Image: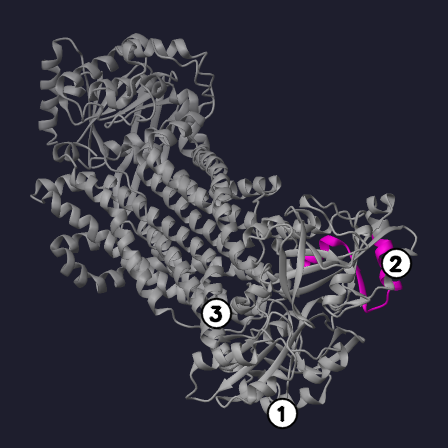
Amino acid sequence: MSVLEAKMVTKQYQMGEVTVQALAEVDFAVAKGDFVAVMGPSGSGKSTLLHLLGGLDEPTSGEITLAGRPISRLSDDEVTIVRRRKVGFIFQFFNLVPTLSAAENVALPLLIDGRNIKEEQQKIINLLEMVGLGERADHKPDQLSGGQQQRVAIARAFVNDPEIVLADEPTGNLDSKSGTAVLNLLRQFCRELQQTIVMVTHDPRAASFANKVVFLKDGNIIQELPIAHNDGHEEDIRAIMRVMRELEL
Amino acid sequence: MFQLGFIRFNSPLILVFRNLWTRWVRTLLTMTGIIVGVGAMVAVNTTNKSTIQAISSFFDEAAGRSDLIVETAVSGETFATDTINRVRRVPGILAVAPSIVGVTVPAAEAAQWEQQLSISGGAVPGTSFWLMGRDLEADTAVHEYNLSEGRLPTAAETSYNVVLVEDYAADKGIEVGEDFAILTPGAGAVNLRVIGLIAKEGIGITNDGVLGIANLAVVQELFNLTGEVNQLELVVDEDIAADTDRLEALRTELDDQLGTSLTVKRPASRGEAVANSLGTYQLGLNFFSVVSLFVGSFLIYNAFAMTIVERTREIGMFRAIGMTRRQIGVMVLLEAGMLGLFGSVIGVGFGLLLAQFLARIVSSFSGQTVEQVTAVPTDLAQAIAIGLAVTIVAAILPAIQAARVSPLQALRIQANLDEGRWQETGLRFGPLTIFATLLILYQVPLRPAVTFPVGSNAIFAMLLGATLCIPILTKPIERLLRPFILLLFGNEGRLGSSNINRAQGRTTLTVAALMVGISMVVGIEGMTLSFETDIMDWVDTALGGDLFVRSPLQMRPDVEARLLALPEVTAVTKSRYIATRLFSPDGEDEYAIFNAIDPATYLNVASIRVQDGPAPAELVQQLATGDAIWVGADVAQKYNLHVNDEVVLETRRGRRPFRIAAIVIDFAGGETTTVTGSWNDLRRYFGVTDVSTFLVRLAPAASLPAITDTIENDIGRNLNLIVESKQEFEDKMRTLSAQAFSLFDVLGLIGLVVGGLGVINTMLMNVLERTRELGGLRSLGMTRRQVRRMILAEAATIGVMGGLFGVAFGAVLADVFLVGLRAVGGFVLNLQTPYTAIAVSFVIALVLALAAALYPAWRASQVNIIQAIKNE
């Protein structure tokens, strides 16, 4: 059963007089509990795909279904509500609100949804402890390292029990140690809480934490690679790089 | 363990609070815009109302317990005492207290006496000494005398005994038991024995306490007015006094019974004339205070628009994680609401403080001491509501802009708002708005009732139009300025100068804030200069004469012959001002001054600037024929009068119609309605033959000090003549006008301060937003000094632009003010270009912009290169 499905999705941009085809009739599906990495060179359409899947942008044609609802046909307000309740986002630059504490940043989606934060307090504490920041809940973002900020962002992405979490280069702005910690966390959420994650990355090492890697080139999905996780990361990374070489990515 | 318990965070309020708190500099800047805007409005409104209140309570207090007052319809005249009995017979009247006032000066001061004018054209209270004669027996029902020393005269005594106000006595060093000499029309200097002192309260505040109270018969005798009184103060039955309708019925009944030569008033209504004479002035102040609020709203808009730019990525994230456009918009408006509320409350406090200061200025030129500044709570609540509304309205566009932020902005390294629309919008609406408003202001005839609101709104629309035109002209002006900036700031200047084209919206708003501030200054100075120039021109040509001869008491007409007999004197003409009441064809009536001139000699000394009507020679001929007057353009405008229309004036012989022979440019009487008629009509209808002023023309070679000495000490020895040269009179007028316009200057200054804050805001924002770029430039080898120069060059360009737009718009504004003054007050003025103000304003704009950019420039030079290029 697919949590998220894109059928024949096309996206075109108008740049002056030139029409740029960012995605060309792409079919894409993610099953519950999947951790999918999307890879491809700059301009391959991976970010565009992520935007469309999260309802941040509208496809030129085709249909996207999230948890059974065709989001490409919804109004702006309706799709916003879907994002609020069904989607979690993790950004490359963390995007925490600098004026709020770590706990308050995590609580933000609940606040926006008009929920009673007091009743959700335990959940927020649990999430922060899960990402290893139980002791830093009242720290402001500028008092946290980059890795810690991204872990707060991960807790924020999962606080609404979303159907799917979309991550845009979540390790792109982190050193390798912090990056590994973040990826391990995502894997942990996926494995233990049966969460579904789609992650855009250009880093084969990051992609090796996923269950499946989808390769994009010139707006088309050109190959999918399941990751077995049998022989450790190094073997998986080598497999991903091999495919990339074959596809000239 | 973190605390969430204290956060009631089921609403976005927490985000609002935190945002305001964290960005406290911006919060303060925005709040300053609201505070000064609301403050100016409250200050002006409170000052105006307190002035009116002071005028009305002055008359109330001086009236004591009296409920009604009987006076002559021609104000300041006398009537026979037998009226007292007629009034006493009217049912409901319990007590009648007659009084008479002799206006004079202490004999010791006669030589130094000088006429003090107020903005309303009348004399400043306290300039002359009032000897008030009262029936002290009848008075017990009306006034309480708070005697601090000595005793009051008894009703029967006929000795020249007087009671003075203690402050005045202390000021002059007079004690009880001493003699106090005053001038009298018949007997020259007369000694009065001071037998008591009263406090400066109740009746003691009359004429600002420059007052003596004597027995009625004594004053009648000293001023040759036996059997005459000025005024009757009446106490009516308590039940009638408590019922407004019954009191009004009694007033009307009495008014009818006493005929047209006498009028019955309520004490408070006597303040009306004074209050009315300040009307146009107060309207002008109100207008500028609203402009201040308007400028404030620019700063608010500016600050909010910038907050949105600064937070674009954050807002994008909010949208990405599920905030709807509406929620975003509401969040911005909530922020505005909170700032508006706090800012307005503080603004009210600031306004009340400012009002204390303004009230002092008003007291100095209006002739009315405003001791207590009192604010009406509903007015303050209204000011808070207006401040709140203006803030929210100013934040609407930024809120819409925020709501439009795409969630995709959250994913970008550096988010940017689309600013390309400014130029397009400017091109589409800017010139059109200006054209439409100019059409409304200059071409559409408006009814007087709507002139002020429509005119003010048109000016605001024009300001908006000018703002919209800024983005169209930014590029060409920047190109024109570039060589100069290059010269001043070198290559960094080139970078800085071109930077202003990057964030068009921000540049536009900053230039606009400066423009409005500068244009207020230029507009106000233009108006002041035009006013002054025209008045001086009028004094020079129309009023004519080289000397004005006056006396504390009215003069006999034969002084004219004695003045003419002096070899240095080539011509003399006489004039007499007398208070009356004017009834226009529309049935309106108002306190007015009848200015009588001598048609036979007037043109020998003065000239007439006729706006509509016959040539001056023919005009004075028509006045000589009788029953004709000329009126100033202001009066004609006020009552919609034309040549050959008739107005009715209250005279001693009842109401008489007068034909309007001409409409002239005339500033006589200031804001008090003044009509000019002939000497014969004065004698015929008002029974007056004495003279207020002689206008004297001297031979070209005459020595001013010598002739002054001759007139004052030779001819005038017994007549107490005082000579004032035209120069002295002009200086007096200039001081008065400077005092009156100083209030406008305060408002102009507020405009400038807000403009300066706008520049700080913009430059800081520019620096913050370009931290990465600045880091890049530093890494390429730009020194800290070069960075500072670049930012200052940018500010200088903005300053010059603000100056250019401000001066251009200020010139238009000055002209519009003059058109407005004509429409509202009837003053016909010619626009004078305030070259000094323009040059000074231009320098102010430049210096203000540079000063405002000092801190941002310093901040920019301190950017940490590594941090800056790592992330934004």
Q: Residue at x 46, y 47 (%)?
A: B37
* Front label number (1 vs 2): 2
Q: Residues within 10 Å of mark 1 (few under 14, many from 20)?
A: few
The picture quadrant where one finds residue B824 is bottom right
**Residue at mark 1:** B618
Image: B762 above or below A73: below
What chain does badge 1 belong to? B
Q: Indicate left or right for B663 with A205 as reference.
A: right
Helix, strand or loop under label 3: helix
Asked if labels 1 and 3 share a chain, the reply is yes
Image: A201 above or below B200: above
Mark 1 or mark 3: name the one nearer the start of the chain.
3
**Residue at mark 3:** B531
Tell me the CA gap for discs 1 and 3: 29 Å
Q: Indicate left or right for B471 with A68 as reference.
A: left
Q: Determine if residue B390 is in view.
A: yes
What chain does badge 2 belong to? B
The picture quadrant where one finds residue B862 is top left
What chain does badge 3 belong to? B
Bounds of the magenta segment? B248-272
Image: B532 above or below B264: below
Mark 1 or mark 2: name the one nearer the start of the chain.
2
Q: Nearer the viewer, residue B80 or B146?
A: B146
Q: Residue at x 54, y 62 (%)?
A: B455
**Residue at mark 2:** B87
Helix, strand or loop under label 2: helix
